[in-house]
Image (cartoon, coloured by chain):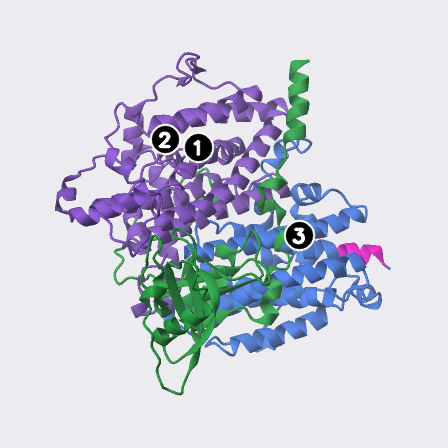
Chain colours: A blue, B purple, C green
Amino acid sequence: MNEIALKELLYKIADDQLILGHRNSEWTGMGPLLEEDIAFSSMAQDKVGQSYAIYNLLHALGEQEPDTIAFTRNANQFHNSIFTELPNSEYDFSLIRHFLYDTAEIIRFDLLTRSAYQPLADLAVKVRAELRYHTLHANTWIKQLGSATEESISRLQHSLDTALPHALGMFEESLYEQDLIHDSIFAGEKILMERWKQQVEIILSKTQLQLPDWDTLTAVNGGRKGQHSEHLQPLLDEMSEVFRIDPTAEW
Amino acid sequence: MYGGGNTFEGIKTDSLAQEDPVKLAEFEARIARGEKIEPSDWMPQLYRKQLIRMIEQHAHSEIIGALPEGTWITRAPGFKRKLALMAKVQDEVGHAQLLYSAAETLGKSREQMINDLINGKSKYSNIFNYPAFTWADSCFISWLVDAGAIVNQLANAKGSYGPYCRALDRICAEESFHLKYGHHCVIYLATGTPKQRAMFQEALNRWWAPMMHFFGPSDKISAHTEVLMKWKVKMASNDDMRNQFLDMYVPKIWELGFTIPDPKLRKNPETGRWDYTEPDWEEFKRVINGDGPCNKERLEVRRIAEERGHWVREALKAPKASYVMPLA
Amino acid sequence: MNSLDPRVNRLPAVGVPGQAEPKAPMDQFGTFEVFVQPRDGKPFQHEGVVHAPNLELAFVLAKEAFTRRFLCVSIFVADTRHVHVSPMTEGNDSVLNYIRDVSLQRSTKETYEIFQLPKRGKQHLQAGQVEAAGPEEAMAEAKKILPADKVIYNLWVIRTNDIRYTRPEEKELWLTLPEKKFRDASDYKGGDKLKEFLERAHS
């Protein structure tokens, strides 16, 4: 088994979950409805918890402690997709990102339940169960708001148009893609992306939202290689502000 | 998180004369037997009015109380703290959700309550009008403000109104996590580096006065509330709750080697109660009436949140569904 | 705004500061009753309400509002307006004494879910299902399945078709609930650290 390839995979998945979980937690106490505030916060907690579990797998493979990994690296060492680091904007964008992202994640973790790397396969069964709620939540809101009023439809459409090129950046392949597939660690980003597109089409066909022709879109890549937007470093500075007062202290 | 301190100012009992004496006697007998009042039961207007006022203030204190700690939600140090603080602030929103629903069973809609909050018509716990300057301030809140709230909420959970008691049972169960988490954070600061210890000492210095205000004005100057005590709406006097809090937590603060900024604070061996410098009740009033360090910001954040969320609610509202009274 | 909270500093300018938009027309959602089953074989218990625009979103929102900690294997929700409520009794007076015998000879019977209140101040518990031609008949039918020797203070009946149940494939939603220890008081034990500190302080 190619351990470098495995670590690379684990890092990018965990970084995605951490950064989006962090972003989504910014809504806590400021959501559009108390009940939704609670639901969105739970999903943010799930994501941060999932990233923690994956950093623990990395730690077992010889990487540093999860806190050190998460709270001391700089932006260029993070391999999350740029999609996850974009600011929350309004709730329409946050919902669309949640929908596009979690639709991909539940497929990703479903594929990972069959990973040859057993600790990851075991974890994926649990993560998939949590994500079942995330997709239920996302699909329900998108289906309803995507066919409600002129305002809700146009807000979601605008956010969808903004989000899609970034969403395609989730499937940016790593240098080790073939190793992962060959070693049966992960079925690969291409398969994931194809299934994701089908699922996105199914849900959006139940709304009045329009999907552009996939071929007209250009993926916003770079995140998987540590090349990020201007938004990630400030996010990390904020996240680690207290931790870095004294990284050797116990908080 | 609610200390119950400023609910019962200026109560007029005039309306009691207009109540049906037979029904009133049955109602009071039921409470005296220790039974709960349910939404479908007859109740005096004053009971309904004071309960709405109290539960609504409690609910507002939860949703506004999410903001001072929320100040640190994106900056909690390390996974354990990050997850816990997210869950803790979420719980405060959840408590608001439960409490607004309990108040709705009495005939006031959540929307009306939130309107009254944003427009400054209803109050919430004074303590949330103070800023959380450092991480240690959020730890103070999680531990000690929650501890104070538990003193009040455990008392109120034995009150007479069924829906409020059931909400409080749930809330108190969740608060035990808040309290343990908060204490855990403070133990880590206390046993950590000199800088960490200093952070908490400074937070303690900032928050002690608001903490003493939390349970409301001294019984000596507070309005008479006998009828509300009899009806089990108000369950303990402000001074008793403050004393109980001091009894339970001053030793725990001292144990960690911190100094409480009140030279007069000591347990009086003769009375068995705590002596302390009388809190500045003029400041308490000033802050309640809008002139605290964060009043404007707290309400402004709530207003913006409501207005940003308006399109979501507008898109899916079903006109006939507006405000249905919950059943229990 | 110049806040200590970076999230607040990022808030967009909306409306007029200090002035709430007049809230007419109302945009409040409807009310839905939430029932939780703590473990398989146990009855569902009423836990509270959520505001939601419709039954499906009520189910989605109820899940995190009421089951993000403690035990849960399944939930269901119903529109408050679809819950038929009996009078409430007290003392040793069972509400069953006030349920009229109704037998409608209509052929189109439907299933109703029955809930009973065993003690004033507590929550309603699921008590079984009956076939009936309407809610009144369902209350009458409920008398046949409820124990006559116990005092029951209040009955609720809900038409089964008005309930959003947890679907079999959704049972997985609570799979990792017991592992979310960070929401439990038991996960925050500072005793050892405190003890060590106190020993150091006193030596």
Give the quadrant of residue C173: bottom right
Residue B273 x/y as whole percent: 41, 18
Quadrant in which the C terminus of chain B is drawn: bottom left
Which residue does the numbered mark 3 point to in the structure image?
A51
Between the C-alphas of marks 2 and 1, the distance is 8 Å
Few, some or many residues within 10 Å of mark 3 (<14, 14–19, 20+): many
Q: Which residues are magenta?
A: A2-8
Q: Is residue B82 left or right of residue B127?
A: right
Judge by depth and name the residue closer to the eye, A218 or C115.
Answer: C115
Give the quadrant of residue B277: top left
Q: Amino acid at mark 2?
A: Phe
Where disc 2 sits, the SS reads loop
Image mark 2: chain: B
Which residue does the numbered mark 2 point to in the structure image?
B215
Residue A135 x/y as whole percent: 57, 66
Quadrant in which the N terminus of chain B is drawn: top left
Image mark 1: chain: B
In the image, which is nearer the foreground, mark 1 or mark 3? Answer: 1
Labels 2 and 1 in the same subunit: yes
Which residue does the numbered mark 1 point to in the structure image?
B148
Residue B203 seen: yes
Judge by depth and name the residue closer to the eye, A15 or B220.
Answer: B220
Q: Amino acid at mark 1?
A: Gly
Q: Residue furthest right?
A: A1
| Disc on the earlier residue, 2 or 1 | 1
Residue A230 seen: no
Q: Is residue C14 magenta?
A: no
Between the C-alphas of marks 1 and 3, the distance is 35 Å
Provide the major secondary structure of the magenta segment.
helix
Few, some or many residues within 10 Å of mark 2 (<14, 14–19, 20+): many
Residue A186 x/y as whole percent: 77, 65
Q: Amino acid at mark 3?
A: Ser
